[in-house]
Amino acid sequence: MSKPTLGLVGVGKIARDQHLPSIAETDLFDLVALVSTSGAAVPGLPTFATQAEMFAAFPTLDAVALCTPPSVRHALTVEALRAGKHTLIEKPPAATVSELQDLVDEARRADRCLFATWHSQFNPAVDAARDLLAAGGVQSVAVTWREDVRRWHPGQDWIFAAGGFGVFDPGINALSILTRILPTRIFVQAADLLVPANRDTPIEARLAFRPASDAIRGPVTAHFDFLQEGEQTWSIAIEMVDGRRLDLTRGGTVLAVDGVVTVSEPDTEYRRIYRRFRDLVDRNASDVDAAPLHLIADAYSVGRRRTVAAFDW
Ligand code: NAP
């Protein structure tokens, strides 16, 4: 079968760091065009200012990959699906839960694939942790996701604007791992949301969860912090009922059991994502997991908001 043609929309950090190299390495899609509001260029590819212009120039285009911030994702995804394009969307999949549900309906009506990616789920260490937890009871779970926003998101003002998710932009990656590996559903019980005086979204958040069943016996907590200098931490520590300790570290790429590393895979998330997308396109099937987005919405729903010191780059 010939390779589906692909257009990439939003040529920012993640498009350049991960999507463009992974599309090239996996060689499962024929990348033919870009859409960039700022006129970003990649050698050998035409750049269009809007999706509509790209669709007009490539009427048989099969698929698009949307790498923009979440605030504009719903409108761009609806436009792509209605134009008959299979659509991959970056995380978080939409600004609100209702928008995401609407996209699921749009994909069904368009009879096209919608793939809402959660890159942190695409790690062998995450799959291995899920298998271990399925076979034994969980005593407690502690998520620590502390990174320096100035280092990883320099100048991205959209992240602190309403609909930009703030520290939940990385934090939702941790939740996407939790919802994948835990043996039972969890509910947000309490949340502290610390919002800079000059911004809309949290710069730090502490969440406490209540498990839906006794498959998890003790506390489940998460701490997300955007002001971590020095060593950066993206880790999940799990104590099992039988006394074993699981540590998922480096954003879910490394798993250690009782201190011994059992899975360590360098960053292959996006290559796996494009293999999955090709499989979905070939089967004209969708893959949308709304659970991590629901938890963020729930944190806003039950959370207490506190104003903290203004943030500037
Ligand atoms: P970014 O560097 O700001 O890039 C986003 C790009 O989207 C912009 O460069 C711009 O590209 C386009 N865009 C279209 N409408 C926009 C708007 N209203 N505001 C800002 N940009 C707009 O952001 P990013 O880090 O690549 O993140 C994009 C998405 O990927 C986010 O949802 C993020 O959560 C996700 N993600 C990021 C990372 C990471 O490490 N940064 C990792 C995984 C996932 P044009 O100028 O070409 O239009």
Image (cartoon, rainbow, N blue to C red):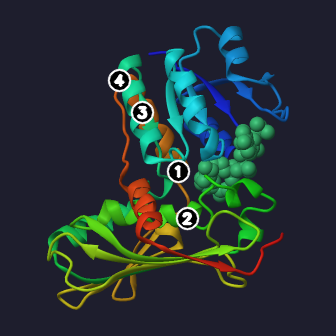
The number of numbered discs placed on residues in the rendered structure image is 4
Label 1 C-beta lies within 8 Å of the nearest ligand 1 atom:
yes
Is label 3 in contact with label 1 (beta carbons under 8 Å)? no
Which quadrant of the figure has residue 161? bottom right
- Mark 3 to mark 4 CA distance (whole Å): 10 Å
Which quadrant of the figure has residue 280? top left
Q: Which residue does the numbered mark 1 point to in the structure image?
A: 92
Q: Residues within 10 Å of mark 1 (few under 14, many from 20)?
A: many
Tell me the element at label 3.
helix
Question: Which of disc 2 and disc 1 is earlier in sequence?
Answer: 1
Q: Amino acid at mark 3?
A: Asp
Which quadrant of the figure has residue 189? bottom left
The residue depicted at 41 percent of the width and 21 percent of the height is 112
Tell me the element at label 1.
loop
Is label 3 in contact with label 4 (beta carbons under 8 Å)? no
Question: Which of disc 1 and disc 4 is earlier in sequence?
Answer: 1
Is label 3 in contact with label 2 (beta carbons under 8 Å)? no
Is label 1 in contact with label 2 (beta carbons under 8 Å)? yes
Q: Which residue does the numbered mark 3 point to in the structure image?
A: 102
- Relative to 40, say whether 144 is above or below: below
Label 4 C-beta lies within 8 Å of the nearest ligand 1 atom:
no
Q: Residues within 10 Å of mark 2 (few under 14, many from 20)?
A: many
Looking at the rendered image, the quarter that the N terminus falls into is top left
Q: Amino acid at mark 1?
A: Pro
Q: Is residue 143 visible?
A: yes
